[in-house]
Image (cartoon, coloured by chain):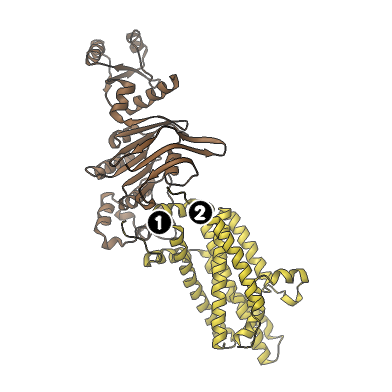
Amino acid sequence: MLLSIGNLTVKYGGNVALSIREPLEIQEGDRVGVIGSNGAGKTTLIKSILGLVPYQGTIRTELAPDQMAVHMQFNEYTDNMSVGHVMEAILDRDISKDKKLQELIKFFEFQDCLKKKYSKLSGGQKQRFTIIMVMMQEAPLTFYDEITSGLDFETRQKLVEKLVEWYKGKEASFLMVSHYYEELDQLADKLLILDKGQVVDYGRREELFHKYCGRAVITMDNTPGNAALMAGVEKMASPKHLIAVSCGSEEKERELTGLLLGNNVNYKRSNNDIEMLYINAKEARNEK
Amino acid sequence: MKNKRKMISKRMLLFEFRNVTRNPYVHIFGVGMPVLMMVIITRAVLGEIVDREALLSVKTTIFLGIGAMIPMATIFMGYGVAHAQELEKGIPQRMELFGIGLRVSLCNRIVSEVIFMAIAFIIYFGVGYGVVGVKLPKLSGAVLYMICILAFSVILFCLAHAIAAMLRKFSLTYCVTMILYFGMMILGGMMGISFDSMPPALQAVARLLPVTYINKDFAAIWAGESYNFMPMLQSYLLLGAVAGILLFVTVKRGSRRLH
């Protein structure tokens, strides 16, 4: 076990920003995606694990502070020199003499940025700069806090592709906070769902999906025609523009898809949709 | 990064030295201003003193006193505002998350500051001896001046760090360090009002500052004359204790809670 959290409470002033009642563990090799809306306590969780905010409760780990790497939402560096010099100082090695660092720089296509100052880098380049240094730490546990926020679609996509490629076949664990479900879809095997500072659920993605969405979910546009067609069918919680139906069994799925095909309705089937999982986990908690 | 980071390393020193030298304040207030003030003030007394030996003594007193401005500007003001700027951006925390703790940062920074200050003093002494003409020191006087300036610099560094860590804002830190900088200069007798012309209340405050003794008495130490170091030492101890306590409190307050 890399990390365990028990009975954790973080308060900002008088307000409880995060409260974790049930024990929560991160095992070696876990890739945990943390989801929740703004103010859910995602960043607070990372900050409390890193000891950056005062908290009550217990956080146990055998990892030394320098064995936990972190890419915060906002990372700033001195603008008094080129990022190449900053990188060499932080990593305590010469770029020209370190093969591994050179490979990472090349992998993240950062060669042409090394002579620039940090403020002159684009948003994507800034993120890649920190990622390179975070990865060079070779930490058993890494935290990524909304690393693609503020990036355009293409840059975001490219960055995530690089991360997927980098972690392929590696044993390292990470905890990644993101508002983009498709990123977690590619990177996370466990999910921690937070809402208003409380844990909604935590577990393996497929188990959580099965728990809240069943075997598979069929979604279609929420048009008057589709709504009429689905009038007698039990629906799941979904974004307003969609109608979502849970298929608990293969038979039900065949029946439903047959009906949709027969009426020439476009639909989407998924057995791992994180957005639907998140919405329905929250819904289930609210119903409780 | 499996290697244990050294307290002081070549790369971190270079990093901090670049940070020091890219700060325009230290060049303007730490090098330009002391040199300019020393030249202007020594020129101003030229016409007032006829006796050559007395003139040399006055010029040496002015020279040594204004020299104390160098650590006050480069370290106290320069580092204070630069550190506040970094704190505002969250840079020290980011560095700590990369395993570069406060102790490593502080050690490399203070060495870099001292190296820069030494360069500033070389320029200052170059102008002092080349242009103005000041007394040559006795070995003991030169060594004591170096020790006093160095001790004063370390105290100012701790004070600057503590002020920036307490205020955490560039504008506030700039304001407070500027007030203290000019306050120390005025009370130290560097701004035209000598210690002897000050009202007793101001003299009482001035006695608490090392800069007062550097400005008014160091010419005698420089020349190897006998001197009662006790009041000066007390001022160092007092300012050192204040700086030490403030540094300890701010470091404790800002430290991470590690599991």
Q: Which chain is yellow?
A: B
Of the pair B177 and A248, the residue shown nearer to us: A248
- Callout 1 environment at 10 Å: few (<14), some (14 to 19), or many (20+)? some
Quadrant (top left, top right, bottom left, bottom right) of the N terminus of chain A: top left
Q: Give me the disc on residue B87.
A: 2
| Quadrant in which residue A220 is drawn | top left
x and y percentages locating residue A180 in the rendered image: 36, 34
| Nearest the eye: A123 or B7 | B7
The reply to whether residue B199 is visible in this rendering is: no
Between B248 and A132, the residue placed more toward the observer is B248
Residue on which disc 1 sits: A117
Q: Amino acid at mark 2?
A: Leu
> Quadrant location of residue A22?
top left
The colour one sees for chain A in the rendered image is brown
In the image, is B112 to the left or to the right of B206?
A: left
Q: Tell me the SS state at disc 2.
A: helix
Q: Position of residue A26 (x, y in %)?
A: 34, 39
Residue A111 visible (yes or no): yes
Residue at screen point 51% across, 72% down: B117
Q: What is the x, y in percent for residue A258?
A: 23, 12
Amino acid marked by disc 1 = Lys
Quarter of the image where the C terminus of chain A is located:
top left
Residue beneath the point at 29% across and 49% down: A108
Q: Residue at x 30, y 60 (%)?
A: A95
